[in-house]
Structure formats: C-alpha cells, structure tokens
Amino acid sequence: MSVFTAMEEKDHEQVAFFRDSDTGLKAIVAIHDTTIGPALGGCRMWDYATDEEALKDVLRLSRGMSYKAAIANLNLGGGKSVIIGNSKTDKSEMLFRSFGRFIEGLGGRYITAEDVGTSVKDMEWVRMETDYVTGISRALGGSGDPSPVTARGVYVGMKATVKKQLGKESLAGLKVGVQGLGHVGYYLCKYLNEAGAKLIVADLYEPSVKRVVDEFNAEVVGVDDIYDADMDVYAPCAMGATLNSDTIPRIKASVIAGAANNQLESESSHDRMIREKGILYAPDYAINAGGLINVANEIDGYNRERAFSQAEGIYDTLMTIYDLAENEGIGNQEAAAIVAEYRMKEVSKLKDIHLPRKNVMGKRDQF
Ligand code: NAD
C-alpha cells in the first residue's frame, strides 16, 4: 500500500515513522487533522503482524480522534500513535523515552497518552523527554484514571437519550442493563444506583459482578443473555462491535447508551438497523468523550471539577445530534459525524481572520 494513497483516503495531514536501533523502537504517529488544535490521541502498543497492519490501525484510530475531539467541543485535533511490539515483553524505560524524544521533535503537533498496551507508568517515561504527553498520574499533577469522568458523561448522555425517547427527566425506576463492569461500568452503576435505576448486569469476571451485586443490589444475567433481558436501557460498557445483526434484533430496550468504543459492527448498516427498530442510540464517541475531556484538561493544568463540568456538556451535544437525525431522517451515528465535521469546518473559517504571528516568547508581534 502506498502511504500517500492511504493518507489521501481519509484526508490525513501527516504520518511520521520512527525507528531507533538502540532501544528497538518502531513507531508510527498519524496526525489526521489539526484544524481545531494539536492532535491528541493515545499510544497503542501492539504486536502487529505487518507494518501495513500497524499503519492501517493508526490511520483509522487517528481519524476517530478528530471526530471525538470536535464533537466534545475541545480545541484539539485527531492523532494517534502505535508502537510495534509486544507490550508484555518489549517494554523498557529507554524505549518510551526514545518515543518521547521523537514526540518532542514533532513540536507539539501531536500530544500522546496511554491506550491499549500502554500504561500511566509508560507515559511517565515519555514525560521525561517531552511535555507533549497526557495521562500522567494524579500524584505527578496529571489527570489519573479517566473512568469516573467517562462514566459521568455516559450517565448524563443516558439521561439525554431517555429524555428524548421516553420524555422522562429522571432514570428512577428504569431497568438499565450494563454489559461490562470494569473501570467505567462500575462507576456508571454507582451513578445509576444513586439515581434510583434498577440494574441488570453481566461480566465475564466474577469478582466485578459480585461487587455491583453487593454494593448496588444488581440483578445478574449471563454474558450471552444480557441482550434478551427485559430492560428499558442497554449500556454496552465492554468490548466493541457488540451491536450487530445477531444482537440488535434481540434487544428489547428502546435506548442504547453506553461507554464502549466502536459499538456498531458496521457503522452504516447497523446505525440504520437500530433506527428502523425504533431504538434511540447514543453515538459511542459522543457519549464516551469524558475520557478524552479528562486528559485534555491536563494540557492547561489539570482541574478535576472542570473536567466533570465539561462532561455534563455531553447532554446538549446528544440533543443536537438527535434533533438533526430526526429532521434529516438519518441514523444518529451519521448525524454525529455531520455535527463533528460542521465544527471542524466552522473553526477553519476563523483562520481567515488574520492574527499577527506569535514570537518565540509566545507574544504577538507588533505591526
Ligand atoms: P475495562 O477493561 O476496565 O472493563 C471492561 C469489562 O468488560 C471487564 O470487566 C471485562 O471482564 C468485561 N467484559 C469483556 N467482555 C465481556 C463480555 N462479552 N460480556 C460482559 N463483560 C465483558 O475497560 P473500561 O475502561 O471500563 O472500558 C470499557 C469500554 O469503554 C471499552 O470499550 C473502552 O474502550 C471504552 N472507553 C473507556 C474509557 C475510559 O475512561 N476507561 C473512555 C472511553 C471509552
């Protein structure tokens, strides 16, 4: 595959390849779009079978980040990086410091963070070489675990979706099925329990199930039975692609609102299938943007209260998406993309207004 052909396909701005023989680093950074601001997105460490597979993944993931940042009303663009290697056996301080030096060399066009296969500790090594990294521990002034903010965003997003679909202001008395009781699922259950919702839960990991049963009096169903459960709201908070041609026909809930990434197996056909079934679906990257909002808050000095308050904005964002989808007769995933693209286009117009250049001290030159 020609790199430029691949970049042209989804309109990427920049792809940087890094290699360092001393540390064994092989990494790719993809910057999709910086119209709204510097590209922010996590660094995935994965044992890709081929370089082509790694490139394909980083291009796909970085584009997704442009849409997520735009829809979350953040002044950030979309980027992502991949380190080609085994996250269990190939990690070292020097590998991540080497990666940090390369990131520094991009001059702030890309800001990294943790992702699948990387951890807060790895990002702290990156931080030794560059300031362009987020997802540092609270102890070092970073934003720490994003899950409570993600869960809060999902909770307010669920309220918006219920309001639109069922006309109810509150979740009290509603039966909510939560698939996946990990970092986000647990906090979501906590918020739902406080709001008076009845919980129906499923997880592969028994201790996580026991915890929500003990703390929130949840009803348990088997991992394969959650789709058929008698529930008003379904909250997928585990893996991607769980909304597909097998599961959608089984879902009795009239609202789907959960944290998982890439919930639709096929973005177009399953978006349509859900709409035709009369279910109101909260587009994943709009409702789960709390995690990105949390790390983005590190850039100007982390403030937990501000992160939670920005996550509340997910309510209005979803309402905008639902109104557009209703008016245009389209699926919510499609409407979300239109709202995100609109913001990118509108911000780019601001750049037509001339501003004097900033000098090295960050001050505007006088003319
Ligand atoms: P996690 O790994 O802590 O939890 C996932 C849970 O899902 C685990 O307890 C696992 O046992 C369970 N699980 C896996 N397969 C399952 C199945 N088939 N049925 C039932 N349970 C199953 O992950 P997390 O951080 O809670 O994230 C959950 C989802 O939300 C992921 O898709 C993630 O990409 C997305 N997300 C997370 C954040 C965040 O802040 N952590 C932000 C945005 C999106």
Image (spheres, rainbow, N blue to C red):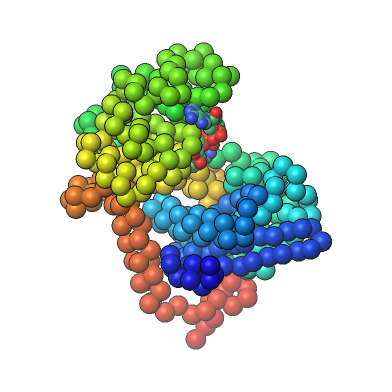
Please state the horizontal and vertical placement of residue 45, each as a whole percent of the image.
64, 50
Q: Is residue 50 left or right of residue 4?
A: right
Judge by depth and name the residue closer to the eye, 314 or 204.
Answer: 204
Please state the horizontal and vertical placement of residue 237, each as a whole percent of the image.
46, 33
On the image, which quarter does residue 338 sit in? bottom left
Please name the residue shown 63% across and 53% down the image.
49
Please state the horizontal and vertical placement of residue 199, each as a whole percent of the image.
40, 20
Judge by depth and name the residue closer to the eye, 238 or 362.
Answer: 238
Please name the residue shown 60% across and 45% down the image.
116
User: Extreme bottom residue here?
Assistant: 367
Please state the horizontal and vertical placement of residue 43, each as a whole percent of the image.
61, 52
State whether residue 197 is above or below residue 158: above
State whether residue 128 is above or below residue 304: below
Judge by depth and name the residue closer to the eye, 261 or 112.
Answer: 261
Please name the residue shown 66% across and 60% down the image.
27
On the image, which quarter does residue 350 sit in? bottom left
Q: Is residue 314 visible?
A: no
Q: Is residue 220 visible?
A: yes
Judge by depth and name the residue closer to the eye, 6 or 234.
Answer: 6
In the rendered picture of this protein, how many numbered marks are placed on residues?
0
Please name the residue shown 39% across and 24% down the image.
226
